[in-house]
Image (spheres, rainbow, N blue to C red):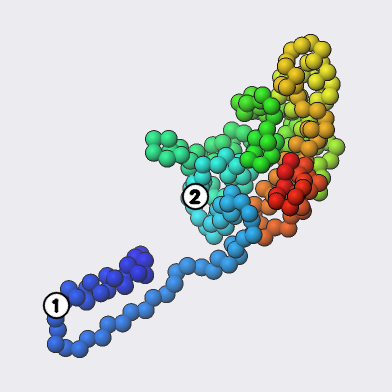
């Protein structure tokens, strides 16, 4: 179907194509808007990432059979995978341009990861290197991914619990801490960063600045990741009600914005 403006232009072209005519002609046309009411998508979400997912979910709910999500941002890929059960089955993530353009089938990744790991993926990303939560010193994403990929079910469930409830509970914090320990010493049975820092320091196995974070620093990192998940877990809500970032590893010291 031609767009209304194109159809109007075509009407004028056809009218002129007939040549001059001494007879008076009156040509009328009526158009009916084909778009639907999308006022429910008016959103107070601050991040474009969430609005992309909100629209993708709405398109799927309206019966879309094929969906392509375009973004250069890993955050969006993680959120799309988390929401994949509610997206149309033929959904893909498109990133890059030109010869670097990649089309990533969401179903393939979701099936490979499985539901437990897929549910934990956004929390893993928020913890290790989201845009606003920071990262762990000396730890590359590939190293962190290996530990996530081999993580036990309790650790994955702890990650998936970030963003659930007002504050992370003891089990969630403990599970996340175990993952961080393994990021710094793969396959370790040590479960607290305090014990791991002391173990590595005694053995002179790493430089001081490359030690795991202190217990206090990790607590703040977990709080920041928890808050980020509070935001991300509302990606399906147009106008979410969220708490202040203060108390979640952030402080607004001079009114100019929140700092960690």
**Of 7 and 218, the residue lying toward us:** 218
Determine whether 201 is above or below 77 in the image. above
Q: Quadrant of residue 171?
A: top right
Quarter of the image where the N terminus is located: bottom left
Give the residue number, with chain letter if any, for mark 2: 67
In the displayed structure, would residue 229 be above or below residue 240?
above
All told, the count of numbered labels is 2
- Mark 1 lies on a secondary structure that is loop
Residue at mark 2 to residue at mark 1: CA–CA distance = 46 Å
Give the mark, 2 or 1, whose residue is nearer the N terminus.
Answer: 1
The residue sitting at the front extreme is: 254
Observer-side mark, 2 or 1, equals 1
Q: From what the image shows, is residue 73 above or below residue 244? A: above
Q: Which quarter of the figure has residue 58?
A: bottom right
Seen at 39% across and 75% down, the residue is 31
Marking on residue 19: 1
């Amino acid at each position: 179907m031609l767009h209304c403006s194109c159809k109007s232009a075509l009407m004028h072209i056809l009218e002129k194509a007939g040549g001059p005519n001494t007879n008076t002609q009156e040509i009328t046309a009526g158009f009916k808007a084909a778009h639907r009411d999308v006022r429910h998508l008016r959103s107070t979400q601050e991040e474009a990432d969430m609005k992309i997912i909100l629209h993708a979910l709405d398109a799927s709910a309206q019966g879309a059979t094929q969906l392509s999500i375009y973004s250069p941002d890993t955050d969006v890929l993680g959120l799309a995978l988390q929401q994949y059960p509610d997206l149309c089955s033929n959904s893909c993530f498109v990133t890059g341009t030109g010869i670097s353009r990649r089309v990533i089938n969401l179903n393939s990744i979701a099936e490979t990861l499985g539901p437990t790991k897929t549910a934990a993926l956004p929390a893993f990303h928020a913890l290790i290197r989201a845009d606003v939560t920071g990262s762990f010193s000396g730890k590359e994403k590939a190293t962190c991914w290996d530990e996530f990929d081999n993580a036990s079910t309790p650790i994955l469930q702890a990650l998936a619990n970030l963003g659930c409830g007002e504050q992370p509970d003891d089990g969630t914090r403990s599970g996340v801490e175990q993952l961080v320990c393994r990021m710094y010493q793969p396959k370790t049975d040590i479960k607290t960063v305090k014990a791991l820092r002391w173990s590595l320091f005694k053995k002179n196995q790493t430089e001081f600045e490359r030690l795991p974070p202190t217990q206090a620093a990790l607590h703040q990192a977990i709080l920041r990741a928890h808050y980020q998940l509070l935001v991300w877990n509302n990606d399906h809500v147009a106008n979410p009600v969220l708490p202040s970032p203060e108390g979640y590893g952030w402080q607004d010291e001079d009114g100019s914005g929140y700092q960690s």
